[in-house]
Image (cartoon, rainbow, N blue to C red):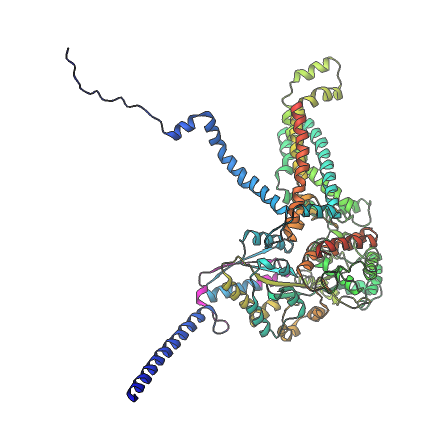
Amino acid sequence: MMTSDVALPKEKVYRPAKWRLFLERDSSMGYAMVAPAGLILILFIAYPFILGIRMSLSHWLVGQEPVFVGLQNFIRNADSTIFTRTVQNTFIYTAAATVLKLGFGMALALVLNNTFRGKGLVRAAFLLPWIIPTVLSTLAWLWMFDATFSVLNWFLRYLGLVQRGISWLGDPVLAMISIIVVNAWRGIPFFAISLLAGLQTISQELYEAAAIDGANAVQRFRYITLPMVKPVLLVVLLFSIIWTFADFQLVYVLTRGGPANSTHLFATLAYQVGVVSGSLGEGAAISLTMFPILVVIVVILLMYLRKE
Amino acid sequence: MADDQQLSRSAVTQSMNRRAFLHIAGLATGAAMLGSVRPVAAGQAPAQLQGTRLTYLQWVNFVPAHDAALKKQIAGFEKQTGAKVAFETINMNDIQARTTVAIESKAGPDIIQLAHNWPHLYEAGLEPVDELAEELGRKGEGYYDLPKSHSFVNGRWRAVPHSIVSPASTYRIDWFKEVGYEKFPDTWEGYREVGKKLKANGHPIGQALGHSLGDPPIFCYAVLWAFGAKEVETDGKTVALDSQETLDALDFAVGFWKDACDEGGLAWDDANNNRAYLAEQISCTFNGASIWVEAKRNFPHLVPLTNHAYFPAGPHGRYHPHATWENAIMGYSKNKEAAKEFIKYLMEYNNYVEWLKAGQGYSTSPTKVFAKDPMWGELDPQVEPFKDSVKYGRHFGYAGPASRKAAEAWSKYIIVDMFAKAVQGTPPKEAIKWASGELKQVYGA
């Protein structure tokens, strides 16, 4: 038998490019997909955060080279009565506003969960305080609280309840109440809409079964509604506490931390000291004090949420 | 030898001639180049500014006519030089934040108009302007001490003084007459007495005591100084607030506030008292002439009922701060020469007088020459106290020098908050102790 040495054409073997192989692996693809978000986090969260830590540990005046001073800024802040008052204010503001938002938000959600004519319109209307930019709505409140031109004062005078206008933002207690009320007014729709979404996932059969068992409205709320919306409630609470604790715009527009620093929160005091007065190190230290407090609150809430 | 000498001399002469020629040619070229940088005569534009784009940040002036006049000046500068000036105005209480951000990020306006003693606070971020400030000072027959103390920082000019907003009392003649006063009282005690009667009559005095850069600190420091108190000793380090004089000042302020003032003032900024006066809610307030200018424009019925007076005097005299404004070129600016030319243009005699005229007495000049201008004689007689009240001017941080520490103490509103605390009910001694502690932190004592 004769054999021939005629070479057959070689079969072309498909070899994918290395980068394609890299991307085809699930683990690598995952990293690639996360990379842009990670980059954004590093650039806009991690870097400023690290810079903030560096600032807080430095004697850093505007335009000048920073000098490392360790924890001196934190110690100095702890000695300041304005700072102590600010810590107190922030807790009061956050607690009071959150309780109000939770209470009224839940009530509103329960009302909106019912069927009535014009329900869509009412829901949209209730969302307005949340949708309008904070500065704009707060400016409207500023006019309502204005000592001279306040519509609230005009109304009270018209009803004969007061002789002269009340200084809503000029009295420390009233100013604190005012900013809490405005924060609650703005935040209630967020609670209401989020809780409404949670309420709508609850099966009607549960309520029917409870009604057959003789449960009244309060019992139905306590034993069915509350446990069922608890996960949503905790997440909403978590977000609200973080936002309220770190609030700036509302207080800055209404009181600028006054009168006599009686309504400063962490963010407004940090702005006043760091940005306005140019003591960047001290300002950063004030701002960073928020961080461990918020971490503790967030961890507790998340642990509770996981347990639930 | 003689030939050699002749040759040598000739060579030297030739050489000298060549040198002289090069020297003269060099000078001529240099002069031509310099001519392109600096105007050879007033009003002549440097050619190299063509196409330059400057940004200028300033507050929204309480007298809109001032801003309108400034826009005309800008248009004139643009026409003359071919440069472009982007003019931005913001609320005066936001300028400090913008300045800090601009300096730290090394980006932003080329020129920022700063107030009060802020050049001390931002010294490191501002371009020194010694030559320009000195030149304008010479031309202007010298600066008043107050604006100089604010712009002259540690031996260098860090800004060029632009203007002074002098405060005085704006009051209702008719309501003062109703309570038996034909003239404005000359002392703080007299002011409290008339205020008590006015408030009882439903026309309280309006005084801002919030965190705002003009009226609140001007009032508080004025009372402090009138009673002989001071925040720091002459060494600029030893805090001197905790004194009988400060206590006297606060005791007065507490009584004055309760007896005479609209208590809503604790939340007021610099604009609230203007609005309240024009809305006929208050009988009197310390302010620049902006209420007067606005009354003439939009509230003519108030014009014959309004007059002005100097600040009252206390047991230790009559002193008060003034709002000074100064143009600072930012250290990061890439258009420093153009910025200097622009500032020089704004301060040129005729240009500046036009700007002053637009203010109708609201602003005065930082240099003395403009006080002699006939324009002052053309203003309303009612604005007389604004013209020369700079003679009662003192810088923040008195009795110490104008300094970064004084600017920081001012920026943190320590003295204003001490007064605000006291009028809110904190015992004056406690308010002084608090403010003294805060000042010690600032002054490092």
Residue B53: within the magenta?
Answer: yes
Q: Is residue A113 visible?
A: no
In this view, the residue in front, B414 or B267, is: B414
Q: Residue furthest top?
A: A1
Residue A157: within the magenta?
Answer: no
Identify whether B134 is placed above or below A66.
below
Taking the spot 61% from the left edge, 47% from the top edge, the residue there is: A55
Q: From the top left corner, tell me how far across and down residue A219 is, in percent.
A: 75, 20
Q: Is residue A64 visible?
A: yes
In this view, the residue in front, A148 or A100, is: A100
Q: Residue furthest front?
A: B1
Taking the spot 67% from the left edge, 31% from the top edge, the residue there is: A237
Identify whether A100 is placed above or below A139.
above
Occupied quadrant, residue B383: bottom right
Q: From the top left corner, tell me how far across and down residue A94 is, in percent.
A: 71, 37
Taking the spot 82% from the left edge, 44% from the top edge, the residue there is: A161
In this view, the residue in front, A31 or B318, is: A31
Quadrant showing the C terminus of chain B: bottom right
Query: What's the magenta region?
Result: B42-68
Quadrant showing the N terminus of chain B: bottom left
Q: Residue furthest left?
A: A2
Tell whether B320 sits left or right of A2.
right
Looking at the image, how many numbered discs can be counted on the residues? 0
Q: Residue furthest bottom?
A: B2
Q: From the top left corner, tell me how far across and down residue B400 is, in percent.
A: 72, 64
Occupied quadrant, residue B200: bottom right
